[in-house]
Image (tube, rainbow, N blue to C red):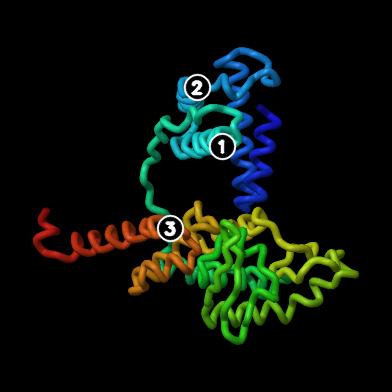
Amino acid sequence: MRPLIQRWLEHLDGERALSPHTLRAYEGDLVGFLAFLSEDFLAKDPKTIDPTEVDPLAIRSFLAAQTKRGLSRRSQGRALAAVRGFFRWLAREGIVAANPAQGVRTPKAPKTLPRHLRPGEIESLLAAPDVNETFGHRDRAMLELLYATGLRVGELVSLDWSDLDLSTRTLRVIGKGNKERMVPFNRAAESALRDWLARWEPLADPARLAIDPSEAEPVFLSSKGRRISDRSVRRILDRHVAAASLAAGVHPHTLRHTFATHLLENGADLRAIQELLGHSSLSTTQKYTHIEVDRLLNVYRESHPRARKG
């Protein structure tokens, strides 16, 4: 099965243009499934396991074993999605007669509302970077742009200067599924980007900081002058969250949620928010309506005289 898993991942990479993060997650899930079959369910050498030996009971047993290990239902759902997708492809290729995971129910994950920052909190965070430090302007531009556009962190770090038009305050980004979209940003983000651009060039000197001259001009640089990584953005954000005295647990995706929530609270159309976020389905965007409903309920309970009596 291991070579078949690799072939399926290559198929996904070529045909579906999934992110490297998603491909790594699927690979880990399928390798874990193969190990379960080998060690627990079939008790045989993994190299000798044939996909035709897998039935719905094997998949349900795999999910039960994940529950015993303490994995969340969300993680179990992703693992099942990997197994289901793999066997769907095997069936299409004629390697198995049918998909054994087709009738296995996805574990229901508890519905949780995404965390977002209130206006005062976001203002404190945006003011946290010290612009007297070498990379203070970079950090401020990064935070302003995340809040102004709702970009995913992977989209942020992939930006090149050629993707931005500072005069019209718009940017072009390639999102999930290799889909391109245009996103506007505000004057505060433009100003922060211009301040950073004025300091970018000497920091990006290829001769001094060993940037690959063949690479495009990344907007956000590491201390070594190379394109910054997702992990570095998270570390930078953690530092500024602490400096702003905000509660722990603020991640780059929190700024994406904050962007969407603040737009909705101020009357933006849900479909417009969907376009700005790059969601392929409106149902993904609709989770933000729950936040708004909760906010309105809280206002009602705190403000209506008879609601306070209850």
> Cβ–Cβ below 8 Å for labels 2 and 3?
no
* Identity, as a three-letter code, of the amino acid under mark 1: Arg
Q: Earlier in the sequence, mark 1 or mark 3?
A: 1
Residue 301 screen position, x and y as percent = 19, 60
Quickly name the residue at label 2: 55
Quickly name the residue at label 1: 92
* Identity, as a three-letter code, of the amino acid under mark 2: Asp
Q: Earlier in the sequence, mark 2 or mark 1?
A: 2
- Which is nearer the eye, 89 or 143? 89
- Which is nearer the eye, 92 or 39? 92
Q: Is residue 14 positioned above or below 128 on the image?
A: above
* Identity, as a three-letter code, of the amino acid under mark 3: Ser
Q: Residue furthest top?
A: 43
Quickly name the residue at label 3: 281
Residue 129 visible here? yes
- Compared across the picture, whether 170 is left or right of 211 comes to left
